[in-house]
Amino acid sequence: MGKVRRDAEQRKDVFYRLAKKYGYRSRAAFKLLQINAKFRVIQRGDVVIDLGAAPGGWLQVAKELSGGVVIGVDLQPIAKIEGVETLRCDITSEDAPEKIKEVLRKFSCERADVVLSDASPNISGVWSYDHFRSYELCEAALKIATTLLKSGGNFVTKIFQGESFKDFYEEVRRKFTFAKAYSPQASRKRSAEIYIVGKGFKPE
């Protein structure tokens, strides 16, 4: 019965239908399109790293917007997208930044212009635990961003709202000249997800 209900909800979901229409791998593609329309985090020619990238909806959008080097990182395999490099890697592992850096070097790049993360934990239904796991993924994404971003680079990550949200937001605000929490229209109304956008990375 649960699957039938989910299928019915998807058929009613305008962004699900649009994703099917335009060939995006997930409705989440429209979240990045809306974030970029508002904040211009990705510009033509940017080197973009997408963390937690499977199944590839954000990668498709990043490649369309940038046209440059785009790298997707996930524990799960990502079906090939033309012009996109992928890496199977746990973004929370200690060696994740170095593994991603090795891929950048294949393109004669040392650093990226943009780091994105739409990574989400497996939902347990225990809200405090799910929020904490989301926070852990955000911390991992921010660590990779601060290791690999160029000065002035941009960062976007998803976090579930909860007790650690304010601390994480302040951490982003300290590391970037601009920080904003934003909920794109494509986020489901019942979802507690919110995106934090950081622009103008300030290396220590």
Image (spheres, grey):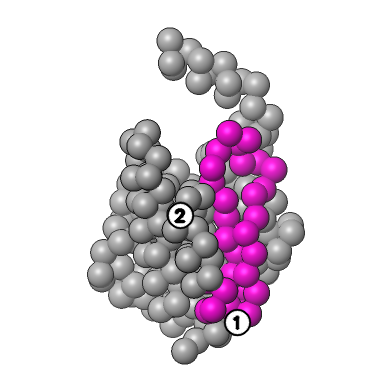
Magenta range? 172-200
Decide if residue 188 is on the left or right side of residue 111.
right
| Helix, strand or loop for disc 1 | strand
Q: Name which quarter of the figure residue 85 lies in.
A: bottom left
Look at the image and tell me whether residue 153 can be seen: no
Q: Residue at x 52, y 18 (%)?
A: 7
Q: Of the residues under marks 2 and 1, which one precedes in the sequence?
A: 1
Q: Residue at x 54, y 46 (%)?
A: 193
Front residue (pair 184, 15): 184
Kindly identify which numbered label has been placed on residue 152.
1
Residue 10: within the magenta?
no
Q: Residue at x 58, y 34 (%)?
A: 190
Q: Which residue is mark 2?
A: 163
Q: Name which quarter of the figure residue 8 lies in.
A: top right
| 146 over 162 or under it: above or below | below
Decide if residue 65 is on the left or right side of residue 6.
right
Look at the image and tell me whether residue 176 can be seen: yes
